[in-house]
Amino acid sequence: MVQDSRKREFPDSQQKIRKNDNTTLTIIIVVVSSITSMMIFMVCICIFLRKRKQRKSRQKVETAEEISIVESLQYNFDTISVATDNFSDANKLGQGGFGAVYRGRLPNGQEIAVKRLSRDSGQGELEFKNEVMLVAKLQHRNLVRLLGFCLEGTERLLIYEYVTNSSLDHFIFDAINRAYLDWDRRYKIIGGIARGLLYLHEDSRLRIIHRDLKASNVLLDRDMNAKISDFGMARIFDVDQTQGNTSRVVGTYGYMSPEYAMRGQFSTKSDVFSFGVLILEIVSGQRNNCFHNGENIEDLLCYAWKSWQKGISSNIIDPTLRNGSGPLHEMIRCIHIGLLCVQENAATRPTMAAVVLMLNSFFLTLSLSSEPAFFVRSSIDPELPLSLVGWPSGQGLGPVSVLLLKSQVRNLLALFTSLKSKETNSSGGQDTLSFGVSILEIVSGQKNNCFRSGENEEDLLCYAWKSWQKGIASNIIDPTLRNGSGPLHEMIRCIHIGLLCVQENAATRPTMAAVVLMLNSFFLTLSLSSEPAFFVRSSIDPELPLSLVSVNEASITELYPR
């Protein structure tokens, strides 16, 4: 029995020894792990502190460099005033959307061009300095070089290099000066503009979208080299950025891309569109909005496309170039490239890198172009007198619609009556269209450029017209109005009136007197409406993913006329 007892005790003691060993091992592992973790943590802290110190020192150096750059770029106001003879009219070169431009000469004899910004530009001192410093870093032979700036009190001046031969529009649209631009010079100008845009979009340390590329913003030096100017409306991004948001966009009608003009979306492809318009203007020697075809006046893009389709694109070539001043195939190729750039769908337009390649590689086969934006899907008679259409007054009804949104739909009559006086203005048709858009916005409670139909986002005018055609116009009514807050027939009638106001042909839109009568007389039968302006004659797939135009490449903006 004693022996059995000892046998039982011995294994117990061995188990205790093993447990003690395991406990010791566990303690050792925990201690070592803790010490190792602490050491790693301390090393990380040291690395972090060291990097932060290096970053701070680097920032100090960069700040010092930036201060040095700012100081080297800043001019004294008195110096510039003397250089321009106190901004005399004799030295005035022109007037832009953001201020006047003057010619001047510095004490060292250097000629300069000084842009005197208007005092209501709304830009703060810090933002002004930052933008100047960024643009001053741009160095390219096809960009006008910014020499410096002046900021004193309310005065904001930009000092540029003086470019001898004025702007492209002074040559290309002038019957006499146009003769100086033979084909070689025009082709050189096209290539220069393309390279300048490519630098802004892809090759500079910053990504810049010009936003107002047009003939008057391309200057020509003494050797007729093109230099892109006027970055007052440009948007500057980091290299890896392709979108940005802005509350105001100012552009020039005729050069604006369709996604910008109709939906407020802007991207680098909008610059490409403007460039395409420029190419066609340079080849034809005529403005895009008043191309003379014999006695008729047509839109240049539409005429170029129709001629291209018929195989007679040489018809748009400037007559001064048809005397053998250059290879016809080069001119035809430039027309082809121009049409590729002005395609309606932004996703199908080439990048500026592709455009430069097309211009330099004549053996490269160009893709087929689809129809340009705003192509003659128009139902308007091309020979309709311009007086029936009228020139835009530049006074939109956006602010008015904001006020109207605060009241009920049926209380619009007072405002309609007050607008009757506008009929004496030649822009009445334009105001009527804007007013029609306002009616549809008020009834629907949504913006015209981003009407939401379920999960889809459509153009309000197009959706309203399609719904009206299908007999389901009530679909666009604001849900908050469908609870019996007002007679449904009044809302439907307002939609009908709105559609009459936004018809494509200005001559078929009602006058404001007629609109007031329609609203007062519910027994008056309304005429049938034709399709609205810019109706889905668009070739862009309505189901086109938004990512192609707005997520990575575009910004949503509000459009203001110049």
Image: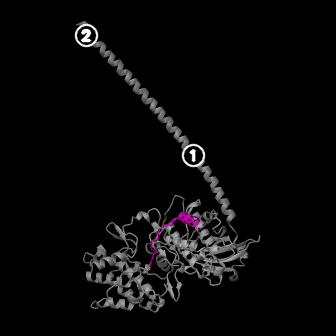
Q: Is residue 319 left or right of residue 548?
A: right
Judge from the rendering whether residue 258 lies leftward or rightward of residue 164; answer left or right.
Answer: left
Taking depth in this image into account, of 434 and 412 the one nearest to the observer is 434
Position in image of residue 142 (x %, y %):
63, 67
Which three-letter amino acid code belongs to the residue tagged 2? Ser
Is residue 334 rendered to the left or right of residue 69? left
**What segment carries the magenta color?**
350-375
Q: For mark 1, what is the residue?
A: 51
Q: Nearer the viewer, mark 2 or mark 1?
A: 1
Please tell me whether residue 202 belongs to the stretch shown in magenta.
no
* SS of the residue under disc 2: helix
Task: Report the residue at 29% width, 81% height from top.
Answer: 491
Residue occupying the point 63% across, 53% down? 60
Q: Position of residue 443 (x, y in %)?
A: 33, 78
Per the image, the residue denoted by label 2 is 5
Q: Position of residue 50 (x, y in %)?
A: 58, 44
- Name above or below for residue 200 compared with residue 424: above
